[in-house]
Image (tube, rainbow, N blue to C red):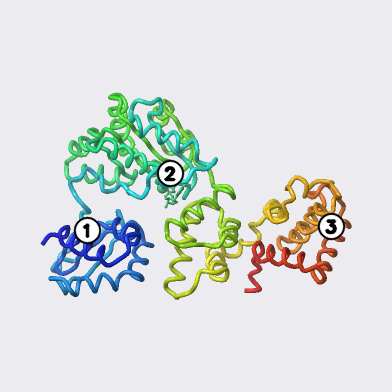
């Protein structure tokens, strides 16, 4: 039996026994890679998948196997695009994940436009990517370069382009590689005197997608090769898309002639997500992972984890993993623990006065503009005092700076506000509740944990 047949037998059996959503989420994305002795090697999209399957479905898989014709079968998981060495009768042998498919398997199906969350930080990049994908080679965006910091969705977008093109034109030769893989192929080509083959493989692409071109830096010969490949493709109207960690013209170590070629296309950036976008991402990712996070924990995470989408995703994954491994319910305490681990001591120093004002405004329904303004209307003044109090207690902002920020008041006014809220908390239940909620949410006094 081949690994494919074997896996389809097991898959079908599992599908009979598990809910459809579980099959779609966790088993559909698995691909069988090899059968070595009695070990079936399965490729999963990421580490979290692996952990999740191990902790939730390993049992079901074993039961299916024990009742099958291959009761001694074992499973071994590898994470996508990871090259592994497998010992086979003492020899080392590299598993080639699904060979002979023009590098296509390296396109991650989960990275699609449909799963890409759009916000003001990435709208332009997404539109450009979609437009290229709908008419590769024919738009003015050739080459298209998507650039920006880590974890902001560049790799996701370049894979989405590949997926879209292949779904519309399955026969298209889409080559998607990292610049490292390109370099490696080139070097291997040289070593084995197969540079022609190397060139053919890349130059016959209809669409060439290269991720992270910054790794070409300083590699003169590879750049040379890339330059020729690029020219040939570009001249014959084929699409080239690249991603980079910064604006291409600012990339040191890349040949000028390469950079000047890039000018003929379009460079678009992806920016870090703002607060609203982080909330949207958290809700979406939580749903995708089949977990329901209460809104206050979502806001808590969005307040503290802000660098990039990968971190946000990683936080959800950790929360899930922790809850499933330790058999704990997902509640505020668990979320706080995980966030604390990920963000560490920066958690409160990362908070800004703006963050505080925004949250107070959300809860009190007093517009931010009024909170930092001059009005003495009671509810506005109260929201302002609460904000001042929280800034003082959580961020430790100086009385003077608070005064300046909140409508140019002097430090005695701020002192008075802080004292008022202190006192009101004793007497007024409503104030007490608001302040405790906000404190819990915003502050993260590590000493208290
Ligand atoms: P980069 O290549 O820019 O470092 P990635 O594309 O690898 O970032 O993104 C990191 C992770 O965050 C991936 O799992 C990706 O799916 C996810 N991600 C990034 N941006 C978005 C987005 N706008 N919507 C959904 N997921 C995103
Ligand atoms: Mg990337």
Mark 3, secondary structure of its residue: helix
What is the number of the mark on residue 414?
3
State whether residue 375 is above or below residue 48: above
Q: Residue at x 19, y 59 (%)?
A: 8
Q: Quadrant of residue 49?
A: bottom left
Mark seen at residue 364: none
Whether residue 47 can be seen here: yes
Q: Spatial distance from mark 3 to mark 1, Cα to Cα?
A: 65 Å
Q: Residue at x 32, y 27 (%)?
A: 234
**In the image, which disc is placed on residue 154?**
2
Q: Is residue 383 above or below residue 175?
A: below
- Return the disc, 3 or 1, that comes first in the chain's sequence: 1
Q: Gap in Å between the C-alphas at discs 3 and 2? A: 45 Å
**Circle 1/circle 2 CB separation < 8 Å:** no
| Classed neighbour count for the residue bearing mark 2: other residues with Cα under 10 Å, few (<14), some (14–19), many (≥20) | many
Residue annotated with mark 1: 32
Quadrant (top left/top right/bottom left/bottom right) for the C terminus:
bottom right
- The x and y percentages for residue 140 are 40, 25
What SS does tag 1 mark? strand
Kindly identify the residue that appears in the image at 19 percent across and 49 percent down: 99
Q: Position of residue 26 (x, y in %)?
A: 33, 60
Please tell me which of labels 1 and 2 falls first in the chain.
Answer: 1
Any part of residue 218 in sight:
no
């Amino acid at each position: 039996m081949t690994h494919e047949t074997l896996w389809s037998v097991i898959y079908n059996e599992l599908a009979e026994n598990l809910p459809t959503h579980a099959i779609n989420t966790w088993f559909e994305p698995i691909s069988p890679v090899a059968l070595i002795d009695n070990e079936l090697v399965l490729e999963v999209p990421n580490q979290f998948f692996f952990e999740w399957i191990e902790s939730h479905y390993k049992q079901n898989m074993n039961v299916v196997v024990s009742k099958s014709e291959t009761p001694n079968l074992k499973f071994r998981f590898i994470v996508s695009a990871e090259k592994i060495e497998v010992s086979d009768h003492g020899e080392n042998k590299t598993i080639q994940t699904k060979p002979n498919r023009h590098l296509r398997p390296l396109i991650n199906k989960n990275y699609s436009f449909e799963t890409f969350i759009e916000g003001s930080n990435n709208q332009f990049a997404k539109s450009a990517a979609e437009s290229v994908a709908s008419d590769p080679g024919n738009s003015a965006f050739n080459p298209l370069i998507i650039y920006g910091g880590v974890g902001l969705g560049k790799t996701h977008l370049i894979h989405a382009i590949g997926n879209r093109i292949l779904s519309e034109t399955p026969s298209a030769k889409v080559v998607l590689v990292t610049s490292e893989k390109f370099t490696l192929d080139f070097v291997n080509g040289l070593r084995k005197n197969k540079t022609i083959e190397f060139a053919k493989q890349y130059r016959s692409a209809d669409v060439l997608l290269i991720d992270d071109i910054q790794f070409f830096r300083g590699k003169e010969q590879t750049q040379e090769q890339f330059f020729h490949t690029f020219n040939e493709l570009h001249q014959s109207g084929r699409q080239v898309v690249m991603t980079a960690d910064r604006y291409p013209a600012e990339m040191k170590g890349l040949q000028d002639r390469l950079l000047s070629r890039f000018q003929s296309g379009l460079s678009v950036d992806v920016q870090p997500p703002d607060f609203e976008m982080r909330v949207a991402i958290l809700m979406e990712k939580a749903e995708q992972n089949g977990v329901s996070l209460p809104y206050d924990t979502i806001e808590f995470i969005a307040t503290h984890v802000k660098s990039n989408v990968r971190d946000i995703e990683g936080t959800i994954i950790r929360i899930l993993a922790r809850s499933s491994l330790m058999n704990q319910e997902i509640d505020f305490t668990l979320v706080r623990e995980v966030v604390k681990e990920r963000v560490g001591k920066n958690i409160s120093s990362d908070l800004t006065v703006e963050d505080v004002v925004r949250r107070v405004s959300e809860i009190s329904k007093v517009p931010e503009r009024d909170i930092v303004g001059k009005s003495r209307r009671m509810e506005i003044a109260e929201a302002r005092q609460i904000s001042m109090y929280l800034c003082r207690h959580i961020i430790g902002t100086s009385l003077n700076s608070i005064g300046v920020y909140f409508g140019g008041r002097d430090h005695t006014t701020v002192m008075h506000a802080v004292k008022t809220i202190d006192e009101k908390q004793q007497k007024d239940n409503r104030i007490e509740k608001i302040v405790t909620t906000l404190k819990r949410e915003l502050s993260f006094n590590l000493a208290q944990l």
